[in-house]
Amino acid sequence: MKDLYDNNLVTGSFSLVVAESLYLTYMASEPADRAKELYYMLCDYNCDDIKLEVVMQMGKSSLPDFDLFLPDWIALLGKCTDWRTKRLLEESMSMIQDDFQAVIVARDHAEYHPELYKQILESGKSQNDPTRFYKIGLEALEKIPVKLKIRSEIALLTAEYSCMMNNSYGAEKCWMEAFESNSSVVNYLRLRFLSKNWDDCSWRVGKIIDIEYHKTMSMKDIPGGYYRNNFLGENALYKNDHCTILFWEKRFDEVIKLGLSEKKMLGWSDTFMKQGLALFLLLLYEGDIYKADLYSMFRLAIYECGFDSKDFYKGTDIEIQKDKYSLFVELFDKWRTEVSVPEEDKNIWIRNIQILIAQRVDAIMEANRRNYYNECVAFIAACGEVMESRGQKGAKQSLMLSYKKEYARRRSFIQELRNFGFRE
């Protein structure tokens, strides 16, 4: 049948044919065989969008013995792990009338279908029983493998119920579990800045960072290792996010060695170089008020690390929520007051940044990549502002003038210099 439709030899709705076939199969099969027969037929048809609800609506009356069929159907689906099965299983879960029975199903299939716990926790938002759903969330965190990213989503849902109970300790515990199962930048920042017990848990965070990065890097030696992480939804801490978190951890020497050591000055899009330069320039800036050129560095850093305020506020009860730019700047300012860097190191950093910017501009010019002129000048302008904040009067104009003389024939480049405040 599918071949006939694929070759346009039959017209009409293929989904309707599948639904009618499944309905007839249900009606013709023995009760004990119905789940198995429907699943086999569904696989043979290879129909991606069919729903059990559509099959239920085929006849003039309700499907006979459906209350006996549904547990068999769920048990069969629970043994499979393909994405189509997950969708059907979620649909079947929504048909369970008894909440306690739904928890039992989620418990039985936690290893391969942790999304069932998530479904229960999301449905609980409409009920006024945070204590019960908080306990369900804690159970889910115990049963679901730590390496799965979906466990992080479940941890944040559990944290929301904890906040409803005014249990700040429980919420912070969930934030830690969220970071351990999905070691993202935003999960780190939430834990870093909202936790009242950061000093007590920072050692565990540092351990997670190192273990997850080592584990992720070891996967590159396994054929299809990186693909496996993404396909199975497993936690992974790749180089760029690792460097970003190390920066916030004030492990600057490691960041420079690992993230700012690219030899090629082209092909930076998949590296930490852009974000690294932006973050270090922001750290080196000593003014009280950020100039416009520094905000371009904030925007670049936010974009490169994928920071989003909506994700940051998940698992919290913060009512007044800021946009991602305002929030990131606020977090950075707070963090900067805690950072102490020797003046000698700062001088070395600023010199090395100037060298990297010069090499980057030269490579862009050699390759005639005009679409990167704006980015290059943004770094030049920000670097000039940093130098001025550190006591070098007129540094921005002087630096821009030197680039104008170096690339006097590049009109588009010089126009970008003007756009960033260069005065001839």
Image (cartoon, grey):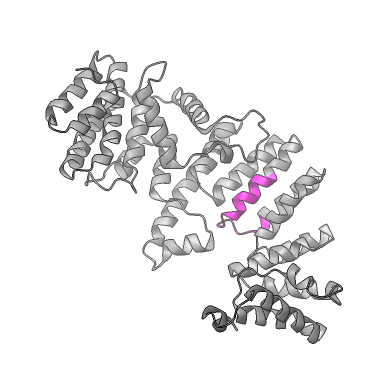
Residue at image x 32%, y 34%? 277
Depicted 262 relative to depicted 27: above or below: above
Q: Nearer the viewer, residue 401 or 17?
A: 17
| Quadrant of image for the C terminus | top left
Q: Position of residue 144 (x, y in %)?
A: 64, 58
Q: Nearer the viewer, residue 303 or 20?
A: 20
Depicted 15 relative to depicted 270: above or below: below
Q: Is residue 357 visible?
A: yes
Tell me which corner region of the image, top left, top right, bottom left or bottom right, holds residue 103.
Answer: bottom right
Depicted 122 relative to depicted 412: above or below: below
Residue at image x 19%, y 38%? 359
Q: Position of residue 414 (x, y in %)?
A: 20, 28
| Quadrant of image for the N terminus | bottom right
Q: Is residue 283 magenta?
A: no
Horizontal side, residue 349 vs residue 205: left or right: left
Q: Is residue 341 visible?
A: no
Q: Position of residue 112 (x, y in %)?
A: 63, 66
Q: Nearer the viewer, residue 156 or 319?
A: 319
By secondary structure, the bulk of the magenta-drawn segment is best described as helix
Depicted 398 relative to depicted 225: above or below: above
State how many labels appear.
0
Horizontal side, residue 147 vs residue 268: left or right: right
Q: Magenta segment range? A: 142-158
Residue at image x 42%, y 26%? 339
Tell me which corner region of the image, top left, top right, bottom left or bottom right, holds residue 242.
Answer: top left
